[in-house]
Structures are given as structure tokens and as C-alpha cells.
Image (tube, rainbow, N blue to C red):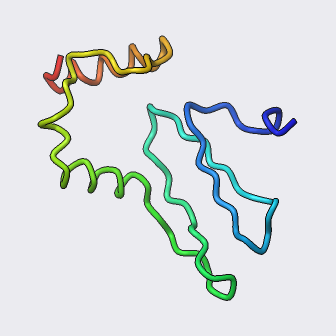
Amino acid sequence: MLREVLPAADYLVHVSRVERRPKARVWPIHLQKRLPAIPIPLRPEDGDTALDLQLALNTVYDRAAYDLVIDYRADPVPPLNPANAEWAKQLLLSKGLR
């Protein structure tokens, strides 16, 4: 079963080049760490291009003004696991958002 070979993580990023399918690469995402830069395939004859997921998230967050929309006093839905919930609580407290 595929689930047995996947790394333990909060989320996973999956990228597959069409000519290599069903093979793919998977990157573990941990909420308490910076998002990775990952290679994104273009056309089969082209090399991959790097996508910095953290930079992309930060850019979207800033341009969409999510800081004005998100109520950081409320718990997230769905809830985080206990370790991530405590980490998030401490992070928000340190930034004066809770």
C-alpha cells in the first residue's frame, strides 16, 4: 500500500512528470518548518523550474491581505494536533495575536 512508504508529515506535496508516471516525488510538509522549494516540471524537453512554496504563500498572504481577514483568536478548523496547536498558540502569543 502506498501509504506505508509516505513520510510522516502534516501535509505532503506530490509532483510527477508526465513521462515518468507513475513514479513521482513527495515532499513532507511540517507546519513548524519553512515550506520547501520544489522542482516543478514543465514540458518533457525542459528542465524543472524551482517553486519556493514559502515565498509563494507569503506573497499570496500579503497581496490578499489575509492578516485583515483571519481571526487568529479562533482555533483553526479542522483543529491541529496537540503539538502543532501548542506551537501555533505560542507563535500567535509571541506576535500579540492571542
The residue sitting at 50% across, 16% down in the picture is 81
Between 53 and 75, the one nearer to me in the picture: 75
Rendered view: 43 above or below 59: below
Query: Where does the image place residue 59, in percent across and percent down from the top left?
Result: 26, 56
**Could you tell me which quadrant the N terminus lies in?**
top right
Quarter of the image for residue 80 reads: top left
Query: Where does the image place residue 77, in percent across and percent down from the top left?
Result: 39, 20
Quarter of the image for residue 2 reads: top right
Rendered view: 61 above or below 51: above
In the image, taking residue 16 as reference, residue 9 lies left or right, namely left
The residue sitting at 12% across, 37% down in the picture is 68
Query: Where does the image place residue 50, in percent across and percent down from the top left?
Result: 50, 69
Quarter of the image for residue 92 reads: top left
In the image, taking residue 52 as reference, residue 23 lies left or right, namely right
**Could you tell me which quadrant the C terminus lies in?**
top left
- Numbered-mark total: 0
Query: Where does the image place residue 8, in percent across and percent down from the top left?
Result: 67, 31
Farthest bottom residue? 45
Rendered view: 68 above or below 92: below
In the image, taking residue 84 as reference, residue 72 lies left or right, namely left
In the image, taking residue 74 as reference, residue 88 lies left or right, namely right
